[in-house]
Image: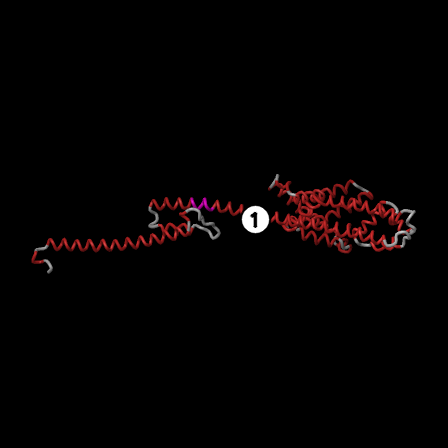
């Protein structure tokens, strides 16, 4: 729906399509607003407390409230002010496309890193940049903007007071359009080659250093946020594995206890059948408990091998016992016969 809404917003920017399909576009817009409203209501109903703890949910709820209030505000505000309010609310519909951030984990990490950077560091960087601009602005005013030293009118327009000087320095910070200002101060009589040293020095400090500091802070925070997110995801996966493993261990112990009870009641002829029944009760994604001896595969194989050896030994003893009994029976029978009937 968000992608479809983005396409509709793009189509509304075409005058021909907007006037030709005005009713259809209005119906689609109201339908999408109804879907967003129902979604917000369902989320609040599902998580009445946790819903308000996430920034993405608050942003979505704010967009829904603003969209629902649009017809009411347009109804009471008339005239030129009403037209401006109407245009402002129509422009705010473009913010609906930002709801796609809540469906992408990577975008959420990036946005959270940017917000954290702005909250923690950007204000300090801006204050430092303003101090530097103030210092160079005062110097630029006395070098290029004061009537005593500046003979060129264009230079006085760019550096005539502190406000104009800082605005010119802001152009230097952006590194876009500063060449025209440089030409004006080069034409000043009293500056000479010092104007270029002034410009190069401020561009190096204000543009290269401060911009790279800002970019470095953003990259550092994005890296930290990504690493923190990975650790949280790893911790969540480990916790889920522990919960599932604990559940499976508990279930396996209960199954083993039930099987041992049935074994004591004689429902199985041997331990092998009991283990086979236990294996049939397992799913393909179940965890096998290896901490307990009774479910250790190595122990089971060893125990089964021992049982095989025991069966083989018992079988040999049985045949030996049979032979012994047969021999003793023959000897007893021979002793009871008359002497003339005994074999030589």
Does 249 lie within the magenta span? yes
User: Which of the image's four quarters has the C terminus?
Assistant: bottom left
Query: Residue under circle 1?
Result: 234
- Residue at the image point whose x is 71% and y is 49% from the top: 29
Does 41 lie within the magenta span? no
- Residue at the image point whose x is 39% and y is 44% from the top: 258
Q: Nearer the viewer, residue 235 or 42?
A: 235
What residue range appears in magenta?
A: 248-253
Q: Nearer the viewer, residue 317 or 83?
A: 317
| Percent coordinates x, y for residue 25 in the rendering | 72, 51
> Does residue 148 appear in the picture of this structure?
yes
| Percent coordinates x, y for residue 265 in the rendering | 34, 44
- Provide the secondary structure element on which disc 1 rests: helix
| Percent coordinates x, y for residue 48 in the rendering | 61, 39
Residues packed near mark 1 inside 10 Å, few (<14), some (14 to 19) or many (20 plus): few
Q: Is residue 278 left or right of residue 335?
A: right
Q: Nearer the viewer, residue 339 or 10?
A: 339
Q: Is residue 336 left or right of residue 291?
A: left
Q: Which residue appears farthest toward the top when viewing the image?
A: 49
> Does residue 181 appear in the picture of this structure?
no
The main secondary structure of the magenta stretch is helix
- Residue at the image point whose x is 52% and y is 47% from the top: 241
């Amino acid at each position: 729906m968000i992608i479809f809404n983005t396409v509709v917003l793009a189509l509304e920017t075409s005058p021909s399509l907007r006037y030709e399909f005005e009713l259809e576009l209005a119906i689609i817009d109201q339908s999408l607003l109804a879907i967003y409203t129902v979604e917000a209501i369902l989320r609040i109903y599902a998580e009445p407390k946790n819903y308000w703890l996430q920034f993405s949910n608050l942003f979505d709820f704010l967009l829904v409230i603003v969209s629902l209030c649009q017809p009411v505000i347009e109804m009471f505000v008339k005239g030129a002010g009403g037209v401006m309010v109407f245009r402002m609310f129509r422009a705010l519909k473009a913010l609906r496309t930002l709801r796609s951030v809540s469906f992408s984990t990577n975008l959420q990490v990036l946005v959270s890193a940017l917000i954290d950077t702005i909250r923690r560091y950007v204000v300090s960087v801006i204050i430092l940049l303003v101090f530097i601009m103030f210092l160079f602005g005062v110097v630029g005013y006395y070098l290029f903007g004061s009537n005593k030293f500046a003979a060129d009118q264009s230079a006085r327009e760019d550096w005539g007071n502190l406000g104009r000087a800082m605005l010119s320095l802001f152009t230097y910070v952006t590194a876009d359009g500063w060449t025209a200002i440089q030409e004006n101060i080069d034409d000043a009589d009293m500056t000479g080659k010092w104007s270029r040293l002034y410009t190069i020095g401020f561009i190096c400090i204000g543009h290269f250093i401060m911009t790279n500091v800002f970019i470095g802070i953003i990259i550092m925070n994005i890296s930290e946020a990504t690493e923190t997110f990975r650790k949280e995801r790893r911790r969540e996966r480990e916790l889920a594995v522990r919960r599932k493993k604990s559940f499976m261990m508990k279930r396996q112990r209960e199954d083993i206890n039930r099987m041992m009870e049935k074994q004591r009641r004689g429902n199985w002829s041997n331990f092998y059948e009991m283990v086979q029944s236990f294996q049939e009760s397992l799913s393909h994604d179940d965890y096998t408990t290896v901490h307990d001896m009774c479910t250790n595969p190595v122990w089971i194989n060893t125990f089964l091998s021992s049982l095989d050896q025991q069966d083989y030994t018992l079988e040999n003893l049985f045949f030996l016992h049979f032979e012994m009994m047969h021999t003793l029976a023959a000897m007893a029978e021979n002793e009871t016969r008359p002497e003339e009937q005994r074999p030589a």
